[in-house]
Image: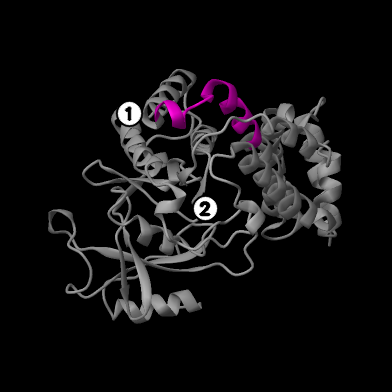
Amino acid sequence: MAWEATSAAGRTAAALNRGGPKIEGPLKGYHHETYVISLDATVGVPGACGEAVRWKCREPREGLFWFDRRCFASEEVVVEALNGRVARIPELIETGGVRLQRFIEGTTLGSRYGAGSAVPERLVRQVLEVVGELARIRPATVTVKCVCAPEDRVPDGDSAGFLTRLVHFTETQVYRARQDEYGALFAALGVHEVAFKYLRERAADLRERPFTLLHADLHRENLILDRSGELWVIDWELAMFGDPLYDLATHLHLMDYPRSQRRRVVELWRGTLGRTGARGLDEDLPVLLGYKRAQSVFTDVIRSALTLADGAGARAGAARLPEVARKLHGVLVRGAGPLGIHSVPSARAVGTALRTWLSRRTPPR
């Protein structure tokens, strides 16, 4: 049976594929609906070892809820601006009026080295190569237009202001914006608006560091190992200018390195950023990590609820509830300190809160 497009993104992919090999997709991804296609051999760039190059054709998902602040209009404008300045990123071409990114043939780092497992140092050093290249890209050296609010564009080096504005985004665009849907659930889990007071107080003491370009989402599923064992960095959707230690905090939070390797990564990162870029690392990294753990609470409460609500209604949600509650309990434990939560509800109590939310959202049949 021939592949049939069922969306605008799929129809664009089919048109560009021009009857070539089978289209792959849609790929798993939060921000975009993505398909992998082939083009005429005369279009694009040559692949490694003579293999055919495939391309990602994608469009933003409609009605997407953003848990992180965006600073640029699209990932493509960032990748285009980094061409020739950052080595381990996919090529970008335009054909038929559509921008396409090269699809890196390989596997995600996470599929080879899962969460909690050590990553070979040669691959960690390849990540640090990208970090070093980003550290040399200062706000004044990139002409890509920012789309974030003017008040979010704090003065270069104002690390306290940078983190304070991220806290403000989480408070207004994630927590307050969804109070009608999730307010009662947050309250049942012991998460209240006063938590943002604690986060702002800690952010105020950050030292100044010159801003650089940040990837802001460096985790195992955004790091691709190609067939020759080289690492590539994808998904630049959340890139921004800001405190270089924020990228380290985000990376450590999302990668879940073993403790011994975590210390090694911090020291390698310190050496890559240099004395100025890593100023105050020992004192400020815990503050930035605290924000990432707190941010995960707000993100994971909503995503956990949606996971339960997705599918065949309350019965399907109930079957997944124990595992979802256990994971969310762990997130609450890690985020309790930064949020000023003195008593974290048990995993059973978390499950009860989720079950109550689910029953009110999806009345039993």
Residue at the disc numbered 2: 238
Percent from the top left, x then y, of residue 72?
51, 60
Magenta region, main secondary structure: helix
Say whether residue 356 is visible.
no
Residue at image coords 42%, 63%: 77
Q: Judging from the image, what secondary structure is the residue with disc 1 in?
A: loop
Q: Is residue 348 left or right of residue 75?
A: right
Q: Is residue 222 above or below residue 278?
A: below
Within 10 Å of disc 2 (Cα), the crowding (few <14, some 14-19, many 20+) is some
Residue at the disc numbered 1: 120
Q: Which amino acid is tagged 1? A: Pro
Q: Judging from the image, what secondary structure is the residue with disc 2 in?
A: loop
Which corner quadrant holds the N terminus?
bottom left
In the image, is residue 277 part of the stretch drawn in magenta?
yes
Residue at image coords 59%, 30%: 207
Image quadrant in which you'd find residue 321: top right
Q: Which amino acid is tagged 2? A: Leu
Foreground mark, 2 or 1? Answer: 2
Span of residues in magenta: 274-291
209 or 148: nearer the viewer: 209
